[in-house]
Every structure is written in C-alpha cells, then in structure tokens.
Image (tube, helix red, strand yellow):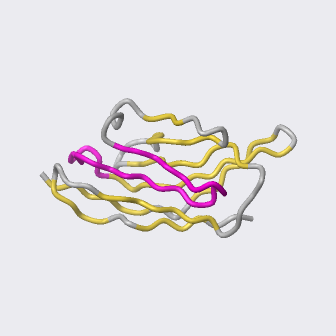
Amino acid sequence: QVQLVESGGGLVQAGGSLRLSCAASRSTFSVNTIGWYRQAPGKQRELVATISSGGSTNYAVSVKGRFTISTNNAMNTVFLQMNSLKPEDTAVYYCNLRTVVRGTFFDYWGQGIQVTVSS
C-alpha cells in the first residue's frame, strides 16, 4: 500500500501563485503516472495534470500555460506549480499515483488539500 501526503495549499488572491507537493510513503517501480486532480463544490473530480513514467505530461486545457507539473527521478514526489491563479481554480486538489501490475491499473489517492483563490 502507498500513502500520499499533499502539502502547499491555502488561500491566495487571483493572479497569485501556489506550489503543491505530494510525497509517496515509498517508491514503486510500477508507476504508470503521477499527478493531480481537483474537485470543486458540486462538480466532478477532474484531471489537472499528470506526468508519465516516460516523462510525458498531460494538462487540462483550463490550466495549460499556467500550471507546471514536475517530479523527481524516483517518481515518489510530485509538484504542481500554479501561477496566474483564478477564482475558478478553487477546489480540493488530490494527488494521484497510478501503478500498473501485470496489465492491471491501481489508483492511490491523497487525502486532498484545499486551494482557495479569492477575487
């Protein structure tokens, strides 16, 4: 089992920046992707950004050009640099680690961290 712990959330004014971090309790060799999702009140959880074991990144259209995802070589820590924040970025942000074992995918989630952007 892998535990994920997020940090770095908080309250920021529109146009400001935050950096989220997520640390996994242990390394795993079967990482497929690691990244971030978010869920705003009354909405479904949505992908924000992920990075694959091969280094490919995937961003939601709404955050492209403003957010940058990065990870360490071991892929047990992932960061999300969020710039030019907007009120619509307000949500609970969840770290996600997806592993693949013998063709089966397993998803691990952090507990979530609040990001609030004031106008």
Which x, y percent locates residue 72? 58, 56
In the figure, 38 relative to 9: above or below? above
Q: Name the image quarter holding residue 25.
A: bottom right
Q: Which residue occupies 42% across, 52% down? A: 80
Q: Which residue occupies 48% across, 55% down? A: 94
In the figure, 79 relative to 42: above or below? below
Residue sitting at the far left: 119
Which x, y percent locates residue 111? 52, 64
Residue sitting at the far right: 102
Which x, y percent locates residue 12? 21, 60
Which x, y percent locates residue 19? 36, 59
The image shows a total of numbered marks equal to: 0
Q: Is residue 81 left or right of residue 73?
A: left
User: Of 89 and 72, which appears nearest the observer?
Assistant: 72
Residue range in magenta is 67-90
Q: Is residue 58 left or right of residue 27?
A: left
User: Which quadrant would the N terminus be assigned to in this image?
Assistant: bottom right
Q: Is residue 105 left or right of residue 68?
A: right
Q: Which residue occupies 42% across, 55% down? A: 93
Residue 119 is a magenta residue: no
Residue 70 is a magenta residue: yes
Q: Is residue 32 left or right of residue 72?
A: right
User: Of 108 and 14, which appears nearest the observer?
Assistant: 14
